[in-house]
Amino acid sequence: NAGVTQTPKFRVLKTGQSMTLLCAQDMNHEYMYWYRQDPGMGLRLIHYSVGEGTTAKGEVPDGYNVSRLKKQNFLLGLESAAPSQTSVYFCASRPGLAGNEQFFGPGTRLTVL
Amino acid sequence: KNQVEQSPQSLIILEGKNCTLQCNYTVSPFSNLRWYKQDTGRGPVSLTIMTFSENTKSNGRYTATLDADTKQSSLHITASQLSDSASYICVVSALGGGYNKLIFGAGTRLAVHP
């Protein structure tokens, strides 16, 4: 049972390049989330999904897109990377709605030059 | 505005000593409060979860308290170990929003020195 995994662990992009971050969970969780963590700030929610085939915007969705084609996978895309998207990205999953904690992946450190 | 503030921002203690981290929040309507531990280069891991009616909860050497009236929580670490060096994040859950919205504090970075 690997829990929540993220690929890649590190990535450096040039401004304007695109990339996709992959999150996978093997716990059969319904809910999945993408956060970004910046120095001196709390984690901020980018997008989330409440089930296969569904996605919704979080607190800071601009510049990102997501897809949840399979229950176990949640993809985060950057179509045209900007230096302001330099951050550490965390994926999390949760079994259901009420009272359940989120389980986090190890993170992806992204640098946009 | 929903906010979670933590203090101190960083803390250095000697191995074996105790310490207390603080969390103040202005989140409404309140659902629950969690403390997470985040090791360097890793994702956060839950330590404790407390609902409105719970005043204290322990997890080994970690004890969390909650005062829902003053909207304050603390995390007390007893007999610190080098492995306690990490960031500790206070997270308050707000009801509503369709996804049980979480508001994250910026964390307290704890360094335990031998």
Image (cartoon, coloured by chain):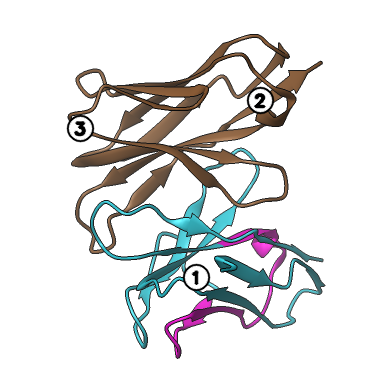
Q: Is residue A70 magenta?
A: yes
Residue A93: x percent and y percent? 44, 65
Residue position marked by numbered label 3 in the rendering: B52
Tags 3 and 1 touching, CB below 8 Å: no
Q: Chain of mark 1?
A: A
Dividing the picture into quadrants, the one containing residue A53 is bottom left
Residue A79: x percent and y percent? 62, 83
B106 sits to left or right of A106: left
Q: CA distance from mark 1 to mark 2?
A: 33 Å
Dividing the picture into quadrants, the one containing residue A111 is bottom right
| Colour-to-chain, brown | B
Q: Nearer the viewer, mark 1 or mark 2?
A: 2
Q: CA distance from mark 2 to mark 3?
A: 27 Å
Using the image, tell me which numbered label, if any, was put on residue B110: 2
Dots 1 and 2 on the same chain: no
Taking depth in this image into account, of B111 and A46 the one nearest to the observer is: B111
Q: Quadrant of the N terminus of chain B?
A: top left
| Colour-to-chain, cyan | A
Residue B34: x percent and y percent? 39, 38
User: What amino acid does circle 1 point to?
Assistant: Asp
Q: CA distance from mark 3 to mark 1?
A: 34 Å
Q: Chain of mark 3?
A: B
Residue A62: x percent and y percent? 49, 70
